[in-house]
Amino acid sequence: MKRRLKRPFFFSIRYKLFATYVLVIMIPFLLLLFIHISTTQQENKEAAIYASRKMLDETKAYLEYKSEAITEVLNFIAFNELVQTAVNADSKPYEDIDVWHMASLQLSRLINQFRYNDDIDSIQIYMRQGLAGATENADFLDMKKAEAEPWYTRFASAKAFVAWLPSTAVDSNADSRELTVLRKIPNEHDIQRFDGIVRARVKPAAMDSVLNHAILTPHAAAFLFNDEGELLGKSDRFIYSNELAMEVSALYRHSDEVDNYYNNNYPIDGSRHLLGVQAIPHTDMKVALVVPYTDILQSSVKARNRIISVFLIVVPFMLPFSFFVAASATKRIRRLIIHVRKVKHGHFQLAPLPASDDEIGELTHNFNTMVQNISGLIEEKSSLGREVKNKELKALQAQINPHFLYNTLDLINAMAIESNANDIKRVVDELAVFYKLSLSNGKEYVSLESELKHIEAYVRIQNMRFGDSVRLEFEVPRDLYDCRLPKILLQPLVENAILHGIMEKDSEEGEIRISAWTDKGDLLIEVCDDGVGMNAEQLSAILQAPSGEGERGGYGVRNIEERLQLSYGLQYGLKFDSSEGEGTRVLLRLPERRLDERGRAQ
């Protein structure tokens, strides 16, 4: 036999597809991605850092403007001659309520003229004597009562004349986002001493709006703190703990920077952040901006994603060039996949695919052979299955039941001797109806109505034998009479109910009830008897092959189960429910199918 020469391995479909995708797709993509990562990432990072610093400078300038405006108001009040006189005045004359009211009205007018500043919510004056020494109110407070407070001790010992601190440090019930500004009222004879304090309560939105304006990236945060590390304000999207202000304050104090501090690698919870701090001139406040490096690099990620998106848009225009390289192989592969899918869904009657000499040709040839073999095996198995079931059904029809046929003929003989011809005619008629319905003109499927008539004929014959000891009741709606089911489906169950249920009772009397209904596209038929019932062991073995004549179940019950599952699937069949002394309930489940007017299945 002449041996066929192999083609060069270079023409293998594996190498064609590999070379196509590497040359046409992977190399340009990797090249563009490498250029982007190496050239643009550093530029975007530097631009983000520069923008953050410029925004921090603008934020500092705006906060400086606001703080100066508030400080100017407090300076004017602190150096006002009326205020300095009021805080040093003797409290005794103000014990007269009219005098106190006139003086407080005069001071209130002075304070209220500075309410034009929208950032100030309220102004209060602490004094050792004067109005507060006689009677306090919301605007004039006794400074002697505050001397034991920590905030007063700290402020009194400080050299600065102005202090910024959270309002909660002065009043625990204050808003946690509110600021308090304190200004010493100097003694008119010694500027190093002070006789009172002016307190301005700053609205939370005054500083927070400025801090929110400093946010450039989704997870950046800005906050304001004083020399003591107390948090004075923060942006809305502040996701860090308040202890961050204390940490940054300590870091700033130990740095060599005078007015500003920058750290491009500040760790927070194990992540790298950009930290910038600038001092607000003429105050003890500092503003800080924290930007996660993930936000800084996000612009690079967006640029990279844009390149990938552009590449994905360009790919369809590049496909025609690669099509000429791999078209012959991919076309056959697609055709083979379509046939595999058809086989997957049970379609085996397919025309053989043409096979070439390469690897795909060999695969196609093997696939054709496999489909032919599987199709033959399935047809053979199906044919054998149908043949076996038909033979079993014919055997069941042939025997229905030899004992029953023998007893019926014996009954006819006895009735011929002991009774008149009418009884014999009745038995023969019932027997003729029974066998006519059993044979059903060779049809494999009959209507539910025909099956019920078959049972009625059977029970009437049995009642002639057992003296009308069996009562049969139907609870079947008329609209279900045309439902289709395999023939001789209910008779074996009724036979078991009579012979192994009712006849084993002491009274040898009982009732059989047959019900039918539909449920979610299925037809359910229930056969109930009030016989002796079964124990758990008998119930578990009901569908198994009987090993002796005394066992219940038997060939007929197993035949019903197998016929239902072969015809409709494993989800259909019989279900038994029984208790000793309480009877047996058999439930049949099969699809709801109807017969047309000619008796054919729809």
Image (spheres, helix red, strand yellow):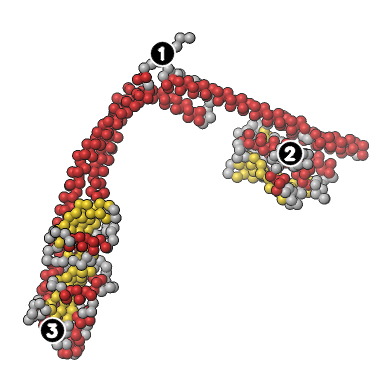
Cα gap from disc 3 to disc 2, whole angstroms: 117 Å
- Is residue 589 visible in the rendered image? The answer is yes
Q: Position of residue 516 (x, y in %)?
A: 66, 44
Q: Which residue is mark 3?
A: 88
Q: From the image, state whether disc 1 or disc 3 is nearer to you.
A: 1
Q: Which residue is mark 1?
A: 5
Q: Which residue is mark 2?
A: 546
Task: Give left or right: position of 499 versus 242.
Answer: right
Mark closer to the chain start, 2 or 1? 1
Q: Amino acid at mark 1?
A: Leu
Q: Position of residue 170 (x, y in %)?
A: 23, 74
Residue 175 vertical placement versus 219 (above, below)? below
Residue, x 26% and y 53% (percent of image)? 219
Residue, x 25% and y 40% (percent of image)? 304
Cα gap from disc 1 to disc 3, whole angstroms: 119 Å
Q: Position of residue 95 (x, y in %)?
A: 19, 89
In what element is the residue under mark 2?
A: loop
Mark closer to the chain start, 3 or 2? 3
Residue 215 vertical placement versus 178 (above, below)? above
- Is residue 105 visible in the rendered image? The answer is no
Q: Amino acid at mark 2?
A: Pro
Residue nearer the viewer, 30 or 558: 30
Q: Residues within 10 Å of mark 2 (few under 14, many from 20)?
A: some
